[in-house]
Image: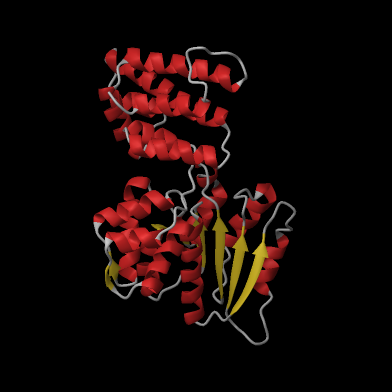
Amino acid sequence: MQIKAEQLRVHLAKGRLARLYVVSGDEALLAIEAQDAIRAAARGAGFAERALVQADARFDWSLLQQAARSGSLFSERRIIDVRLPSGKPGKEGAEALTQYAADTAEDTLTLLSLPRLDRAARDSAWARALEAAGVWVDVAAVERALLPEWIEARLERQRQSAPQEALQFVADRVEGNLLAAHQEISKLALLFPPGGLTFEQVRDAVLNVARYDVFSLAQALLEGDGARIGRMVEGLRAEGEALPLALWVVGEELRTLLRLKHETQSGKPFASAAREARLWGARVAAAERALSRLSASKLASLLARCSELDRIAKGLPAPRCDSDPWLELADIALAAATR
């Protein structure tokens, strides 16, 4: 059975624990919280002992079954906490996990922690066997547009609230860094009593702890969020991100949009073109809105500017570009975000 991370608490509250849980996702804070919730529920159900298994590249997978069978003299029920940080068990590991899923013991609760798997790994026999044998907890990243709502929910847990302006302010400051967001929200509980917070209280308490993901720059471009683009380019530069990678991200997004523009103008339905371009989720609607504001000629012009900027990044002269390549990149992305 597969559930989302936000459904886990309801599942655990029912009191009927599965004998196998898989927590999969790259959002560290949410994955840690899901693992902690499962361990706490297991301890409450009498699984008093815990064995940690670190399955690295040199791991002997026969030890997994041994860990499950070697009970303690003092505890009849135990948690087997398996960490697979690579998400790639290899052939031997895949066979061991498939067999393990088919042979879960009644007195053992297994918790397997994985990063987010790609489509091929998620559809593999070992992953399907684990899901069929227990509960697969999918830990999804919090999309930028939903971050204020996520912060609001976290404040409600500590019996606090804040106006929308304050929620947006916090989201801007902690973008891409949920661990820091959690720390800042917890700090508000220490500084102020339960109840409503003012924007000024939140502003004065929250630090600028954003960690910018270069690939999120493409989403900001699609959404036409000029203020966010400015913050992200400045943040990526300050964090020492490689300019060629940021340029590649922007250029690839512009090429995708130009291809979609040509295909839709020639009569192909946007949904079909978007699938072929491998767009999904929030990117689909954002790309459709971007096409409505960008002409084919403007997209071609911006791609030409990317080529000129690439010359600068390689140390070649490009007289029509800004002498500061990061400013030129910001200008290209901002131009794509406006009509």
| Colouring convention used in this rendered image of the protein | secondary structure
Q: Where 14 sits versus 100, above or below?
A: below
Q: Residue at x 62, y 56 (%)?
A: 84
Q: Is residue 101 visible?
A: yes
186 sits left or right of 82 in the view: left
Residue 36 in percent (x, y) is at 50, 69
Q: Where 290 sits versus 74, above or below?
A: above
83 sits left or right of 29 in the view: right
Q: Quadrant of the C terminus?
A: top left
Q: Residue at x 38, y 72 (%)?
A: 191
Q: Quadrant of the N terminus?
A: bottom left
200 sits left or right of 75 in the view: left
Find residue 73 and report its image quarter. bottom right
166 sits left or right of 2 in the view: left
Residue 105 in percent (x, y) is at 57, 71
Residue 250 in percent (x, y) is at 45, 27
Q: Is residue 142 visible?
A: no
Residue 47 in percent (x, y) is at 54, 79
Q: In the image shown, does 268 or 178 lie closer to the viewer?
A: 178
Q: In the image shown, does 211 or 98 lie closer to the viewer?
A: 211
Q: Where 67 sits versus 248, above or below?
A: below
Q: Where 298 sits versus 183, above or below?
A: above
Q: Residue at x 37, y 28 (%)?
A: 334
Find residue 101 and report its image quarter. bottom right
